[in-house]
Amino acid sequence: MEGAARVFAGDFSQSTLSVPDENGNLSWVVTPGGAWCRLVYLCGALTEVTESADVLYCRLADPTGAFTLVSGGRNALLAEQIRALPVPSFIAVTGTAHLIKRNGGCDTVVRPEHIAASDRAGRDRWIVTTADMTISRLGLLLDAIEGNKADGRDGTVVRHYSLTKERIREMAEIVGGALAGVRTAPPAQEAPADITGIVMEIVKEKSGPRGVSVDDVVAEAGTQGCSQDAVIAAIRTLIENDDCYQPQKGYVKPL
């Protein structure tokens, strides 16, 4: 299953390339930084919510810029969840990426599928992981510029955006600026790999349309000798690694 892309707003908002899926699925939004986005995972500060007719427009900011979230009225439960969110507040969003071409320009939007409350620490973890992924993508683009990998996805990005080494350096500096605002903190305790595997199997087995409650996961894992603290740490690890997400508070579901 294709994982959710992590991308900074400053990169995503500069996108002008959309590549259709050959199987007729949702097209990719391709960023200048080399991210191919369909499902995306974002975390940042919700700074604005406006409503027009039955459509909600939200501004989700990270240190490089802001995403535009657009939610139609067909998902009433999600709309009510958005309306109940404090502004400003930190939130995590899983949604689909879209590139809209009109009036000779391009607009990028994300249509949220799941939204959960977050905090500064969660936002900082997202920045660090997104920065690592972005730097890796920039390295591949640099290889393509130097002629080491001219074909494939990276070559497509380099050609469309006419990328140069200087542009790559500028994007890397933006990533560095985003990391500069991250608070230093002791690393979170990671769950042992064996407990993480047990928890993942429970989540897969027990998940329904709403996922499975964290309490039920803790109870089931407890019958296999796992402590509550270890199970909570395992769930946190699975979410941070994009193996699971929280469709609503107190529930977890496999991606």
Image (cartoon, helix red, strand yellow):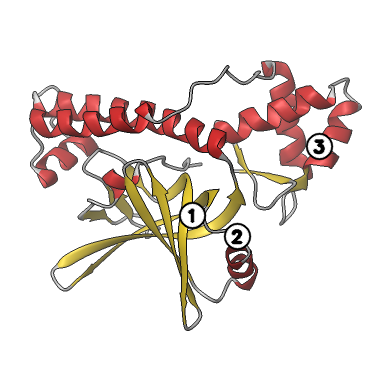
Q: Which residue is mark 3?
A: 217
Q: Which residue is mark 1?
A: 46
Q: How many marks?
A: 3
Report the front residue among 59 and 3.
Answer: 59
Question: Callout 3: few (<14), some (14-19), or many (20+) C-alpha neighbours within 10 Å?
Answer: many
Distance between mark 2 and mark 3 Cα atoms:
27 Å
Distance between mark 1 and mark 2 Cα atoms:
8 Å
Q: Which residue is mark 2?
A: 85
Residue 33 in view here? yes
Give how far across and how far down residue 174 sits, in percent: 25, 34
Question: Callout 2: few (<14), some (14-19), or many (20+) C-alpha neighbours within 10 Å?
Answer: some
> Residue flagged by tag 3: what amino acid is it?
Val
Give how far across and how far down residue 27 sits, in percent: 33, 56
Instruction: Name the residue: 83% across, 27% down.
Output: 228
- Of the image marks 1 and 3, the number of the one nearer the N terminus: 1
Quadrant assignment for the C terminus: top right
Q: Are marks 1 and 2 in contact (CB under 8 Å)?
A: yes
